[in-house]
């Protein structure tokens, strides 16, 4: 578990280390390739993005050199505020769906299910990529797809679900469902079943047990799961594109691609990248703090 | 406990609760697999008719074979490079004490939390203006390596931490050099952890389309990128569905094989299993 990793790093010197000196040459040498790789291909591009976000459109390419401006950020707050809003809205809704359906799933998985390996085997499917989820969901929701009899029975038009907010949110929720289940499951397995049994013995109804015993004890895991799902969903790219109307296609990830790679407006694209970065990093940092130490 | 005033156990609310719980689990699992099954179903048909045929899979060995081979090449290169830099890093992190260890670890796992579009646009800019890597397969490989490096590192670190120091000390007492100890004692014993890392990296790299979309040179089109392009240009075709289903089958088979051989405990802590 993540705690194991933290423990690996901070156990006593006497337990796992071979030499007792402060700074040594060997570990630095051994770590050098990975640090080099990360610096060259992660930190440098990120710094580049931040720098570029202050330039004006494609002026980085121009002969006169880049012109620096705050205009991109002004645009983000003004003209592109709906994009940021849609991104946060979609990610938030998907996280909510994950929470509502993921908590019972995790609870049943931890407390009642014996065939956990089979469940784990099935749970890898969403991780293969949001693209397949979106693609497959499109099939299912098409007229003539599998859900058509269900829709006819309910008297609904299948097509209004195909391209719209519900299917996009549903696809995003499927994609990050395993993250929520993992976090909540870890928190739940730390709760002694004895406590629930005691609460039932003392006369609490099931919902009271849930609300007053289980929920407070698993709160940190819940929050960590929600934050992790949100952090992964802000970068959603394929689901809004394949399943969404023009409104959903205004998510930051897709707008970034259009402005940056297609229209070569690097200034604006990198500004969106910076906004995404801030969103994702703060959320993930907060989630690590809540998941009892995590990796840091 | 007296049973005369109790309903029979068959219909008690407790049993109903159990049945409902299991039904809920299986419903959710069905929802996970449903997109794949829909794709699979469609890939076995020709057009929208109900005729089932395997002819679409012939395309896999026809026009899609280049993309699949490219995917495999990128995966192999990325995994190989990853192993090369992760094994020393894991050893340093677990067996040595030095200040700033936590900071370095959190800096190294940062790529896991960077949204793919951000990584993509950053690398596009870096490749275009500084590194000049736009036309080679190595651009994509380096992007994959930096993205899956944490996924390779964590299982190996956990495996090394679980390995008692006694073995290495014994080997060195018996006269082995550091290098011999590493290659003949440590490496075989953390084999399952390394395999877990390889599995995770393979799954991610094989199915990665987002960073590929930004970074890949036109001559380097991996299979998931091909699926994405086809969906956007040609709409929903049976052959595209065949390719997508094939890739999922390959990934799923890899996972099942891993579970069969090693069990699931080596993937703990990676937040993916």
Image (tube, rainbow, N blue to C red):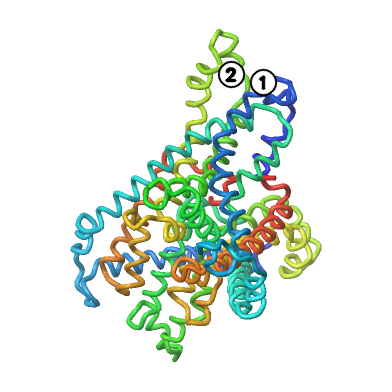
Q: Decide: marks 1, 2 in contact (CB < 8 A)?
A: yes
Percent of width and height locating residue A126: 47, 60
Residue B84 position, x and y percent, is 48, 33
Q: Chain of mark 1?
A: A
- Density class for disc 1 (Cα within 10 Å; few <14, some 14-19, many ≥20) is some
The residue that mark 2 highlights is B168
Badge 1 and badge 2 in a common chain: no
Q: Residue at x 55, y 44 (%)?
A: A40
Left or right of B230, for residue A214: right
Chain for numbered disc 2 = B
Mark carried by residue A168: none
Q: How many marks?
A: 2
Q: Is any part of residue B12 visible from this angle? A: no
Reading the image, the residue beneath label 1 is: A18
- Residue B158 seen in the current view: yes
Q: Residue furthest bottom?
A: A155
Taking the spot 47% from the left edge, 63% from the top edge, the residue there is B29
Instruction: Specify few, some or many for label 2: CA neighbours under 10 Å numbering under 14, 14-19, or 20 or more.
Output: many
Whether B247 is drawn above or below A57: the answer is above
Using the numbered discs, state the Cα–Cα distance from disc 1 to disc 2 in whole angstroms: 10 Å
Q: Residue at x 60, y 9 (%)?
A: B173
* Nearer the camera: disc 1 or disc 2: 1
Q: Residue at x 64, y 55 (%)?
A: A183
Above or below, A267 relative to A86: above
**Quadrant holding the C terminus of chain A:** top right
Residue B158: give x, y in percent of width and height. 59, 37
């Amino acid at each position: 578990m993540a705690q194991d990793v933290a423990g690996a790093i901070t156990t006593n010197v006497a337990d796992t280390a071979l030499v007792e000196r402060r700074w040594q040459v060997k570990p630095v040498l051994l770590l050098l390739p990975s640090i080099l790789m990360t610096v060259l291909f992660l930190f440098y591009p990120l710094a580049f993005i931040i720098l570029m976000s202050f330039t004006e459109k494609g002026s980085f390419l121009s002969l006169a050199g880049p012109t620096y401006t705050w205009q991109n950020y002004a645009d983000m707050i003004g003209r592109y505020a709906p994009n940021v809003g849609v991104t946060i809205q979609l990610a938030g809704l998907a996280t909510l769906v994950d929470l509502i359906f993921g908590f019972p799933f995790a609870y049943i998985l931890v407390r009642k299910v014996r065939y956990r390996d089979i469940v784990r085997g099935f749970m890898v499917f969403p991780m293969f990529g949001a693209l397949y989820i979106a693609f497959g969901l499109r099939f299912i929701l098409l007229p003539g797809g599998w859900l058509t009899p269900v829709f006819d029975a309910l008297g609904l038009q299948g097509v209004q679900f195909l391209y719209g907010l519900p299917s996009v949110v549903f696809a995003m929720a499927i994609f990050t469902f395993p993250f929520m289940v993992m976090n909540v499951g870890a928190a739940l397995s730390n709760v002694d079943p004895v406590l629930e049994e005691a609460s039932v013995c003392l006369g609490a109804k099931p919902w009271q047990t849930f609300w007053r015993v289980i929920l407070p004890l698993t709160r940190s895991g819940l929050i960590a799961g929600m934050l992790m799902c949100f952090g992964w969903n802000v970068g959603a790219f394929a689901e809004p594109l394949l399943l969404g109307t023009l409104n959903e296609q205004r998510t930051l990830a897709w707008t970034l691609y259009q402005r940056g790679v297609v229209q070569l407006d690097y200034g604006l694209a990198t500004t969106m990248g910076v906004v995404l970065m801030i969103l994702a990093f703060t959320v993930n940092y907060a989630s690590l703090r809540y998941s009892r130490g995590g990796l840091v | 406990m007296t049973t005369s005033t109790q309903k029979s156990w068959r219909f008690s609310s407790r049993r109903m609760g159990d049945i409902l719980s299991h039904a809920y689990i299986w419903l959710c699992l069905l929802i996970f697999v449903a997109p794949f099954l829909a794709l699979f179903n469609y890939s076995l048909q020709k057009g929208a008719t109900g005729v089932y045929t395997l002819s679409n899979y012939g395309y896999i060995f026809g026009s899609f074979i280049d993309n699949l081979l490219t995917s495999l090449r990128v995966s192999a290169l990325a995994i190989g490079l990853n192993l090369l830099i992760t094994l020393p890093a894991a050893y340093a992190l677990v067996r040595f004490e030095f200040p700033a260890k936590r900071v370095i670890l959190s800096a190294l796992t940062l790529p896991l939390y960077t949204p793919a579009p951000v990584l993509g646009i950053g690398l596009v800019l870096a490749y275009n203006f500084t590194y000049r890597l736009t036309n080679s397969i190595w651009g994509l490989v380096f992007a994959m390596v930096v993205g899956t490096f944490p996924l390779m590192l964590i299982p190996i670190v956990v495996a090394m931490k679980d390995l008692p120091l006694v073995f290495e000390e014994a080997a060195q007492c018996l006269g082995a050099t550091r290098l011999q100890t590493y290659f003949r004692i440590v490496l075989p014993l953390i084999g399952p952890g390394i395999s877990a890392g390889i599995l995770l990296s393979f799954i991610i790299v094989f199915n990665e389309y987002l960073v590929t979309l930004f970074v890949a040179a036109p001559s380097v089109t991996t299979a998931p990128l091909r699926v994405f392009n086809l969906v956007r240009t040609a709409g929903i075709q049976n052959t595209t569905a065949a390719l997508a289903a094939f890739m999922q089958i390959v990934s799923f088979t890899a996972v099942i094989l891993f579970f069969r051989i090693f069990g699931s405990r080596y993937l703990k802590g990676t937040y993916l299993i």
